[in-house]
Amino acid sequence: MEPVRFTTEDGVSLEGELRVDVPEPVGSVAVCHPHPQHGGSKDHPILWAIRNELAHRGLAVLAFNFRGIMGSGGTYGGGHGELKDVRAAVGRAREAAPDRPTVVCGWSFGANVALREALDDDRVAALALTGIPLRPGDVLIPPLPSPEEVRAMRRPVLFLAGSNDEYCPADELRAYAAETGAEVSILEGTNHYLWRREREAAALMGAFVERKLAGT
């Protein structure tokens, strides 16, 4: 694991960790963490499981902290400044696997930001997102793109959630996925935090990423 720093287009210095397990990665990944104002950081067990899974599948994996978190500069950007963070993370991840496809993964708030950033970022070949907040409750977060916007993006998307996810109800996720043309996977018997199911969730995401990158 290599500690790295990189800078956003508005001059914010972000910290991250880059993992490259193979001499020639088949692609790169940027991993986006949950809400900065609700304890989110790059070090949650779900994100560690995703990192491990994708690194084992031969991808260069960058996990990073959004602005204002731990060693990253700046302050919380309300879900808008964080778009610049994801854009910069995609660029840094791609340095580890030049001319290879790039995937963005995210959980909760990170899934929201990842999807919104990818709408106009052609460098993103696919997205694997878990617990995307369809019902954020009293947590302030920018609205998700419309199904028409996601469909027009024309890139593979996986939505994953636990069957008891209160922020991402399974039936609503299936409906959103159907409208967007995305794939959907529901893990029965778990909730937004996927406790003790992290590896299982990561394996589903890894299989999706490997399958989609094989076709690029």
Image (tube, grey):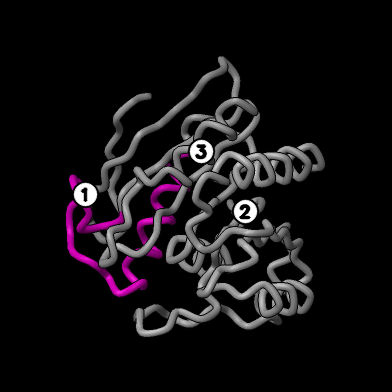
Which mark is in front, 1 or 3?
A: 3
Q: Which of marks 1 and 2 is in front?
A: 2
Circle 3: element type: helix
Query: Where does label 1 land, which residue?
Result: 72
- Indicate the amino acid at tag 1: Ser
Residue at the disc numbered 3: 49
Q: Which of 184 and 199 is in front in this view?
A: 199
Tell me the residue that label 2 is attached to. Answer: 128
Which numbered disc flags the more N-terminal residue, 2 or 3?
Answer: 3
Q: In which quarter of the image is the C terminus?
A: top right
Element class at badge 1: loop
Amino acid type, callout 2: Ala
Residue type, numbered disc 3: Ala
* Residue that appears at 55% across and 78% down: 134
Q: Position of residue 200 (x, y in %)?
A: 63, 42
Q: In this view, does 176 lie to the left or right of 197?
A: right
Residue lying furthest right: 215
Can you say whether 131 is above or below 194 in the image? below
Residue 18 coordinates in the image, percent (x, y): 40, 31
Name the image quarter holding the N terminus. top left
- Residue 153 lies, in percent from the top left, at 68, 68
Left-right relation of 57 to 113: right
**Which quarter of the picture shows residue 80?**
bottom left
**Splitting the image into 4 quarters, where does residue 215 fall?**
top right
Tag 3: Cα neighbours inside 10 Å, few (<14), some, or many (≥20)? some
Task: Indicate the position of residue 163 as horizontal and vertical percent values.
Answer: 65, 65
